Amino acid sequence: MDAIWMEPSCGRAAELRRGPWTVEEDALLAGYVAAHGEGRWNELALAAGLRRTGKSCRLRWLNYLRPDVRRGDFTPREQLLILELHFRWGNRWSKIAQELPGRTDNEIKNYWRTRVQKHAKQLNCDVNSDQFRDVMRHVWMPRLLERIQATSTPSVEHAESSPAVYLMKKSAAPNSPLAGPSGGVGMCHSSSSRACSSVSLEVQFPSNQLVMNDAGGAADWPGSEQRGNGSAQSDDMFDGSWSELLARACEDGADSVLFPDFELGQDTDTTSGVWSTSGYNSSTDLQVLSASSSYYY
DNA sequence: AATAGTTGCAACCGCTGGAAA
DNA sequence: ATTTCCAGCGGTTGCAACTAT
């Protein structure tokens, strides 16, 4: 049942509008916010003559009309950042969105549900399961790093401003999947003081070794024949070929060829995530690192 | 060409916490 | 101290667009 909206000028009761916003409504809202600013959404809705709840106006402004809202596909950097931050913070969408300028919590939430959860389902995994986290850590995230590397200019300025590097610098958290064995930004292997100016990315697996060079080329990767050139690829990491690859791997058993069986911590707390150091000691760290991925920038 | 099924996204809903009355 | 209001958050739903049959 629709709520009742009182016409401010004459007190006449009118029905509140719901559903998709019209161009006229958008213009009204955008114009009013431009003139008077955000906030006091209920009052704003009335004053602007919008037959919408303040809540609806706020949502429309924040998720769609705000000038700095970025639209379009998530870049590999953004995808990597989402994965990493979700490991750390769980479904704290607004908190995650704060780290992706121009992206809204709604958009990130939708991305997670429509892409990430979908593929967890294809693998018959719970999205928060250790198994699925392994898939992300050992397959998707290295792949994203490869894509980022393949498309980035190896300049200090660029590297410094990339979400992945930003993330590493900001967090340097010991529970970060991007953190090195020392717990800090330990992936920078450079002989010069200009760390990260020359970038190479190495991802190792117990039974498969993949070395990605500066050009982002993969020497050995299951299913690598499916990949075309970078420019022809979708920015979506979870494209069909990956779905197929992962589905096959799942059919074979996630601990068979592609996904090693790790002695990961049993901590299922999404805030600490699979990379929580709470259950690790230094020797375990070494075990995990030797058995899994290592990232070198 | 028509229909059914699927997907992705925009919008809504209910809840919570903080501020104001 | 209590109540009310509101902003913000995460979960869920509705529907248009797309795809498969």
Image (spheres, coloured by chain):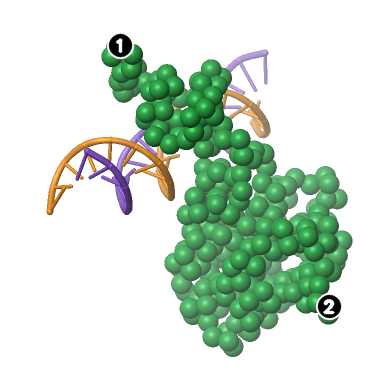
Chain colours: A green, B purple, C orange
**Mark number displayed over residue A192:** 2
Q: Are marks 1 and 2 in contact (CB under 8 Å)?
A: no
Tell me if residue A71 can be seen: yes
Residue drawn at x 70%, y 49% is A75
* Image quadrant assignment for residue A225: bottom right
- Mark 1 or 2, closer to the camera: 1
Q: Position of residue A270 (x, y in %)?
A: 47, 63
Residue drawn at x 73%, y 50% is A241
Going from N to C along the chain, the mark reached first, 1 or 2, is 1
- At mark 1, the secondary structure is loop
Q: Is residue A76 above or below residue A274?
A: above
- Quarter of the image with the N terminus of chain A in it: top left
Q: Which of these two is toward me, A30 or A154?
A: A30
Q: Position of residue A163 (x, y in %)?
A: 67, 58
User: In the displayed structure, does residue A297 sit left or right of residue A98?
Assistant: right
- Looking at the picture, which amino acid does disc 2 mark? Ser
- Looking at the picture, which amino acid does disc 1 mark? Cys
Q: Is residue A199 above or below residue C6?
A: below
Chain of the residue that carries numbered disc 1 in the rendered image: A
User: In the displayed structure, does residue C2 sit left or right of residue A94?
Assistant: left
Q: Which of these two is toward me, A101 or A144?
A: A101
Q: Is residue A226 above or below residue A218?
A: above
Q: Residues within 10 Å of mark 2 (few under 14, many from 20)?
A: few
Q: Position of residue A3 (x, y in %)?
A: 31, 23
Tell me if residue A60 can be seen: no
**Mark number displayed over residue A10:** 1
Residue drawn at x 57%, y 72% is A173
User: In the displayed structure, does residue A146 sit left or right of residue B20?
Assistant: right
